Amino acid sequence: MSLKSEQQKRSRTQSDRPLTGSIIFPDLVWAHYAWQSRIRPHEFIRRGWVRWLLAIPPLLNGRPPWGEKNGKGKPPDLDVSKLEEEYIKAVRNFECSEGQIIRAYWCATEASAVVLTEKKKLLSWLPWRRMGSLELHRATDWVTADAPEIAELLHNGDTLAIRINRVLNAVPRRIAMEWVFSEQSYLLGFVERMGGHPSRKDTAPTIARHRVEIDRLELYYDRAARKAARIWYFGGMLLGLGVVIGLGALIPYIIDLFGHLDLDSTSARTFYACFVSGAVGAMVSVMTRMRQEDGVRLDYEVGELLIVMLGAFRPVLGAIFGVLAYFAIDSKLLPVTPPSTGSTFFYYALFAFAAGFSERFAHVILGSADLTVAKTSTGTESREPVEPSGRRPTAPATTVGRSDSHDVQGDSTTVDRART
């Protein structure tokens, strides 16, 4: 293949590649403004004494004082049809790349706009995939050239829309995105009503009102994001429970590599009961704490994958704690004796459930086992405790084997024996 044919193929591939919305949206805004300014010219009425001063010449010439450019000017010329075709072509290119425009605000006095698009997902006929991906597109630098405070608020709305679009689920995401679009449309309308030059006196109440709405939106976003994180965490726990079941099915095959495991024995049944009870206890613990507002704290902005992975580890850890509790009790490593009456099967299963349910209880079991092993290996349990001064502590006085009529005498005799 020659070099020329390879370059032609490469250029053809690049031309067929769709452009992103951030590149073609300004072209769409300019195409709309060029068509709109020709077919429907518009200019907001100026305020104050300038308004009345500009109204004097039209009144003297017998024309209306205001509104000449608001759709009542010269009739459109022949170029309007061509501008309309270019605008429709730009809309088709933009929607082909970014999805259908479902909300739009086009500025009438400048080439500025904000639109909300929705792109359908694959398999959109499924109930849980009917909501497409929403994106907010904005090009407002021309209308906010003399309103830097409004431009900063619009930029903050873009960053909030990015967080909303990446964290929330379908229905809360749609509500929050349309909320952001409504606020940005309100700010653009305010700038246009002020003729592109809003004063500080008029801007202050608008900014105060906008911040109140943003605070409400932030509160809604935080609550919806926490609920979404809990849903993903619960889905991860279900995945972890499936992993626990899979590990339980693989354990006999792994043990057969080194020996034989009798699944009909009492110890094997107790092992599996503790294995599953620990995992179920961990899930029940999380589900009971989810009822509280701050019971389960999750960083919902780390992503769905990490939240699912954290939830999947929870049943696995519960199963491990349940098995450790069974081993610690059955090996007599803990000073706990199963009851002589009744079935030890439920006794071990209850301990395993408690170990998976409460991490603090599991730490107590492991700490007690660690202390027992340390005492056994070092022989410290036969030694008497020593005070910091180097002397052994005095044993408390106790009365053993004395009748009620000799209490005082028995106490004194016991003290004398303790001193000797």
Image (cartoon, rainbow, N blue to C red):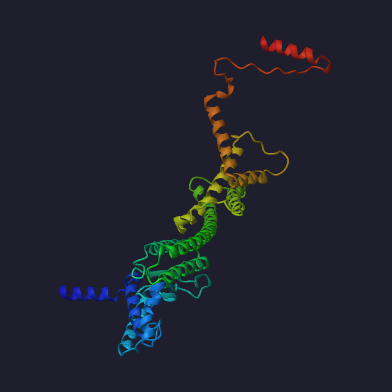
Task: Tell me which residue sits at (38%, 69%) in the image.
Answer: 138
Res. 218 in view: yes
Residue 318, above or below 223? above
Query: How many marks do you count on the picture?
Result: 0
Residue 321, above or below 333? below
Q: Nearer the viewer, residue 38 or 264?
A: 38
Res. 2 in view: no
Horizontal side of 229 relative to 16 (left or right) equals right
Residue 73, above or below 414? below
Residue 74 position, x and y percent, is: 34, 88
Quadrant in the picture for the N terminus: bottom left
Q: Nearer the viewer, residue 258 or 372?
A: 372
Residue ranking furthest to the right: 405
Residue 377 position, x and y percent, is: 52, 27
Q: Nearer the viewer, residue 99 or 73?
A: 73
Horizontal side of 255 relative to 73 (left or right) equals right
Horizontal side of 368 relative to 396 (left or right) equals left
Quadrant in the picture for the C terminus: top right
Residue 301 position, x and y percent, is: 46, 56
Residue 321 position, x and y percent, is: 56, 44
Looking at the rendering, which quadrant does residue 409 occupy?
top right
Looking at the rendering, which quadrant does residue 328 occupy?
top right
Residue 25, above or below 276? below
